[in-house]
Image (tube, helix red, strand yellow):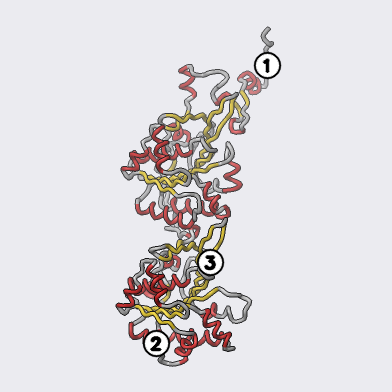
Amino acid sequence: MNEPNDLIPTGIAGLDDILLGGIRRNNNILVEGAPGAGKTTLGLGFIHAGAAHFGEPGVIVSFELEPDKLLRDAAGFSWDLEGLVRSGRVKIIQTSPAVLLGEFHASEGVLAQELKAIGARRLVIDGLTPLKLYAEQHHTPFREDMHTLVEGLSRLGVTTLVTSELGDRSVPGHEHERFVFDTILTLMRQEQRRRGSRKLRVMKSRGQDFIDGEHTMTIEAGSGIHVYRRAQSRPKLAKLQPTSSERITTGIANLDGLMDGGVYRGSVTMVAGISGTGKTVSAVQFLCANADRGRTGLLVSLDEHPEQIMRNAATLGLDLRKHVEAGRILIHFESPLELDLDIHFDRVSRLFESRQVDCIVFDSVAVYEMAAQAEAADYLYALATFFKGRLATVYFNYESPELLGVSQISQELKGSHLVDNIILLSYVEISTKLRRAITVPKVRGSRNVQETREYAIGQGGISIVDEAEERKAGEQVVPQLHFSAYYGLLSRSPSRKSPAIDEAIARGQQMPESSAPAQ
């Protein structure tokens, strides 16, 4: 629908992505929002970007703010608006609503002359609210003033941005501007858990497509406004999702065997378990083993600082630091406090693409529930879709409060259906000893071994116990028998098997008599 030559970039970071290239030339744009939402800042950025980067001089018309204050605010974002004024590429006019409306009633007013004098292609009027107040004070219909304004703007042949306060929708006439403007951008401020955030939404934009929904917006010192596309709105790369038959090692030899040779390249694996079961250890083994094979890895840590992760890995003989210093493994750390999902997605995806990452681990995705519980499931799906579409091999580490973890994944996070593989790490109490158990209940497209096996964490990381080898070595100690001697390991209350009873049941024979107690 959008013609590339008909769109002009706004110059606002991230906004042109949402507008699929920019805004239609000569559109009249309404930017509405509450006080402090960023309306004037967006207007200043629009004018600065046009004059400084796109060869489009601009004019700013202000009713309330003095030119010196506008220049001061622009300097805070490293915008040399004052230099653009001196060079004749930007003009700031302070006037009154009555004078501006009079300009549009005339066929060739002072404003039109000022625009022609500098060859202006962009115009910002800050703002619409004083025009409303003027109409109320002089008992004139605001609807007529709006038509005069819009008709006058259309004659000027410039792309115009007008700011407006979000007022009382029940007041007659205050909604009329939403119908006569071509494009409407609504800026919002939201409060959640005593934390403020900004959102931007494109309500309409005539003659072009755009990405709907509420997108995160920030106002950053030294750079101005940055809009982060809603993560769940990421477009697909192609109609067909790329797939591969290549197997990728988990970094744990016996686990590769349980999973029919490892995980497929481009698959998503969820590793679930309670704290202390070794989820981060398995992630480090996965990344290190694949780094040794020439694949670039990325660890997105939402729990531990990179230095702590590398120290703990070193105690197990895993030289993670070597790979990090060589650039084969990247560690991206973000604190779970005040984590914004859209900004987080943007940072991770840019790092992933700039460094051409092959394997990526998120440790732990349970943090996304804390950041935005209502969006966590959709957000995981967006992550999985984005990275699978680029044939990256993904690990989601999930901190489950249960030993088994399956019910929490299914009921709260609802992520088990979107992953290709599930690895469960849990504790099993046998007699007075707590032992670790690993199960692989799901491996798409594979003949996985659905057995619960014991594993240990020691030098080299996680190793799965080979029962046959231990029996040969005579390391079996009663009553701590191998897992194959028990029923219901994942039920948290395993029962001891009786070979004699098992054989009697299998053959349809009577149960063997209990032996007499020793005298």
How many labels, in total? Answer: 3
Q: Position of residue 298 (x, y in %)?
A: 40, 46
User: Label 2 amino acid?
Assistant: Ala
Of badges 3 and 1, the one in the foreground is: 3
**Side of 63 where 491 appears, left or right:** right
Q: Residue at x 31, y 79 (%)?
A: 88
Is 383 rendered above or below residue 81? above
Q: Residue furthest left?
A: 87
Is 145 rendered above or below residue 510? below
| Separation of marks 3 and 2 at Cα, in angstroms | 33 Å
* Foreground of the two, 138 or 201: 138
How crowded pointer 1 is (Cα within 10 Å; few <14, some 14-19, many 20+) is rated as few
Return the mark for residue 114.
none
**Side of 474 where 121 appears, left or right:** left
User: Label 3 amino acid?
Assistant: Met
Q: Residue at x 45, y 66 (%)?
A: 18
Q: Position of residue 91 (x, y in %)?
A: 36, 80
**Where on the picture, by quarter, is residue 66?**
bottom left
| Separation of marks 3 and 1 at Cα, in angstroms | 76 Å
Residue linked to disc 2: 112
| Separation of marks 1 and 2 at Cα, in angstroms | 105 Å
* Foreground of the two, 240 or 401: 401
Disc 1 + disc 2, Cβ < 8 Å = no
Q: What is the secondary structure assignment of the residue under circle 2?
A: helix
Residue linked to disc 1: 512
**Of marks 1 and 2, which one's residue comes earlier in the chain?**
2
Q: What is the secondary structure assignment of the residue under circle 3?
A: strand
**Where on the picture, by quarter, is residue 19?**
bottom left
Q: Position of residue 56 (x, y in %)?
A: 34, 76
Residue linked to disc 3: 188
User: Label 1 amino acid?
Assistant: Pro
